[in-house]
Image (cartoon, grey):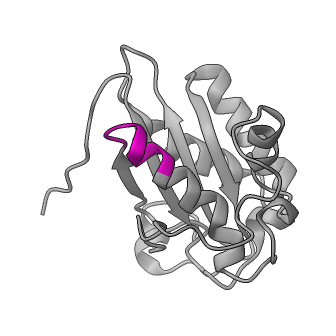
Amino acid sequence: MQYRRSSIEGGTYFFTVNLNDRNQKLLVENIQLLRNSFQHIKNKFPFYINGIVILPDHIHSIWTLPDNDSEYSKRWRLIKSHFSKHLPKSEQINSSRNNKGERGIWQRRFWEHQIRDEEDYRKHMDYMYFNPVKHGYVCNVIDWPFSSFHKDVEAGIYSKNWGLREPSELEVGEDI
């Protein structure tokens, strides 16, 4: 079966990217390496990160690509590869991954959704920012350190008390 993804040049997309072993905490335990991986790839293949939340085992992010570019899959592949290459090899690798020279850190696929309009954008930003509370990592959105929520509070987009109660329309997307 051919897997089809949306491909709009200059599009804005919501992503969920997961570790292969959802019991790991590699992303927050290696947060600086993950940040370096993003920056390294952004330097080579620019894109704008509208918002991001990094949880122990998965990432939610919204990106906007350059006007003449739709290659978000390439960027995710390179970010995941850069991150993986700089971690010690300690994970279990099944024969399929081993035969392809792959590490066993990330799930092969990721979930993407093309943002349709301002309301869709807001719903996905709200969902992303509330995710650490939903998973029980913190009681208040502002308390999760691995989130661009803090930047959006400084910019006046969100109040620091936003998310003390669950927003009513957070049913967008699912953690895979």
- Which residue: 73% across, 32% down? 39
Specify start and end residues of the magenta stretch as a single range.
115-122
Tell me, yes or no, if residue 88 can be seen here: no
Q: Specify the farthest residue to the top.
A: 68
Q: Position of residue 28 (x, y in %)?
A: 81, 64
Q: Hey, which quadrant is residue 151 in on the image?
A: top right
Nearest to the observer: residue 99 or residue 71: 71
**Is residue 8 found left or right of 110 in the rendered image?**
left
Tell me, yes or no, if residue 3 can be seen here: yes
Q: Position of residue 88 (x, y in %)?
A: 80, 64
- Which residue: 73% across, 58% down? 162
Q: Hey, which quadrant is residue 41 in on the image?
A: top right
**Is residue 107 found left or right of 164 in the rendered image?**
left
Magenta stretch, main secondary structure, is helix
**Is residue 143 found left or right of 155 in the rendered image?**
right
Q: Is residue 110 above or below residue 67?
A: below
- Which residue: 84% across, 36% down? 154
* Residue 69 drawn in magenta: no
In the picture, the quarter occupied by the C terminus is bottom left
Tell me how many marks there are.
0
Nearest to the observer: residue 107 or residue 84: 107
**Is residue 7 found left or right of 155 in the rendered image?**
left
- Which residue: 75% across, 70% down? 164
Q: Position of residue 91 (x, y in %)?
A: 68, 77
In the picture, the quarter occupied by the N terminus is bottom left
Q: Position of residue 95 (x, y in %)?
A: 45, 79
Nearest to the observer: residue 1 or residue 169: 169
